[in-house]
Amino acid sequence: MERKGKKEEKRRKDEDLFKVVDSTLDTRTYYLLFQLSRRLKLKNIYGSISAGKEAKVYPAVTEDGKWYALKIYYVSTAQSKRALEKYTFGDPRFEDIKVNNTKQLISVWARKEFKNLNRLYKNDVRVPEPIYVLENILVMQFIGENGVRAPLLKELLDEEINENLYTDIIDQIEKMVNKAELVHGDLSEYNIMVWEDKCYIIDVSQAIDINHPNALELVKRDIDNINAFFESKGIQVIETEEILRRLKIYQNEDQN
Ligand SMILES: Nc1ncnc2c1ncn2[C@@H]1O[C@H](COP(=O)(O)OP(=O)(O)OP(=O)(O)O)[C@@H](O)[C@H]1O
Ligand SMILES: [Mg+2]
C-alpha cells in the first residue's frame, strides 16, 4: 500500500516537472531530464526562453527555490559539424574526441561549453556558474530573477548603456585572454547579458584556446563587434589595436 503510494507520488512529481515544456524534445532528452531533475532536485522546468539554431534554454527551479538555466542542444547540422571541426582542430583538449554520430556530436558541444564555462569561471571571468552537464544538457546559473532572464546587451534601452558597461566588458575580454587563455570567438551584443549593472558573457561553446591558429583573428573580431555596438550608441571606445596590445596573445604574436 505504502509502496504504491510512493510510486504514485513519483509519477505525479514527474508529471509536475514540466510546466510548459514544448513537444520538440526527443524521448531520450526527456529521459535525461528526469534523471537530471532527481540529481539536482528540480521541481519545475519551464518553457524555453530562447530558440537558437542549435540549442534552447529553459529556466528550471529546484525544490528549495534555486533557479538554473538548462541549455539543451538539439540539432546537428552539417554546418555545426564543420564548425566543430574548425574549432576543435589544434585544440589539444579535444583531440581524443571522435565524432562519428549525431548524438555524440551534440554532446560534444554541451561538454565543450561546460569545460569553457568552468575555465572562465575559475579565472574570475563573469560567466554563469557551470553546474552540471549530462549528454546534450548543460546546467548553469540562471542570470536574472525568478525565472525571468536578464536582458541581453542588445535589448538594453539607450539610456542604460554607458561607459562603465563598456569598460566592464573590455575587462572581461582581457581576463578571458590573459588569465583564462581563451578567446570567445562569437562575442557580440547578442551573447552578453546585463544583470545589476554587470555584464555576463554567455554562449561559450565555440571558445578556443589562445594558442589556436585563428585566435588572434577571432579576438580582433570580438573586440570590433563590441566597439561597433558601443560606438553606435555614442560611447567613446578604445581603439581595437590598443586593446589588442594589452593581450598576451598579441604580445606573443609580436615576438614571432
Ligand atoms: N545562464 C542563463 N541565464 C538566463 N538566460 C540565459 C542563460 N544563458 C542563456 N540564456 C538565454 O538564452 C539565450 C540563448 O542562449 P545562448 O546564446 O547560450 O544560445 P544560442 O544563441 O542558442 O547558441 P547557439 O546557437 O550557439 O546554440 C540567450 O540569448 C539568453 O536570452
Ligand atoms: Mg547566443
Image (cartoon, rainbow, N blue to C red):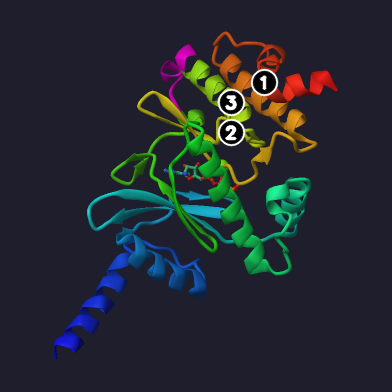
Residue tagged 3: 173
Residue numbers of the magenta segment: 156-164
Question: 34 or 190, which is in the foreground?
Answer: 34
- Mark 2 packing: few (<14 Cα in 10 Å), some, or many (20+)? many
Query: SS at mark 3?
Result: helix
x and y percent of residue 140 in the render?
Answer: 43, 48
Task: Give the residue number, with chain letter if any, for mark 1.
Answer: 247
Using the rendered image of the protein, determine whether residue 162 is visible from the camera's viewpoint: no
The residue that appears at 58% across and 33% down in the rendered structure is: 180
222 within the magenta span: no
Check residue 160 for magenta coloring.
Answer: yes
Extreme residue in the top direction:
236
Spatial separation of the CA atoms under disc 2 and disc 3: 10 Å
Q: Quadrant of residue 40?
A: bottom left
Q: Where on the picture, by quarter, is residue 30?
A: bottom left
| Mark carried by residue 180 | 2
Q: Earlier in the sequence, mark 1 or mark 2?
A: 2
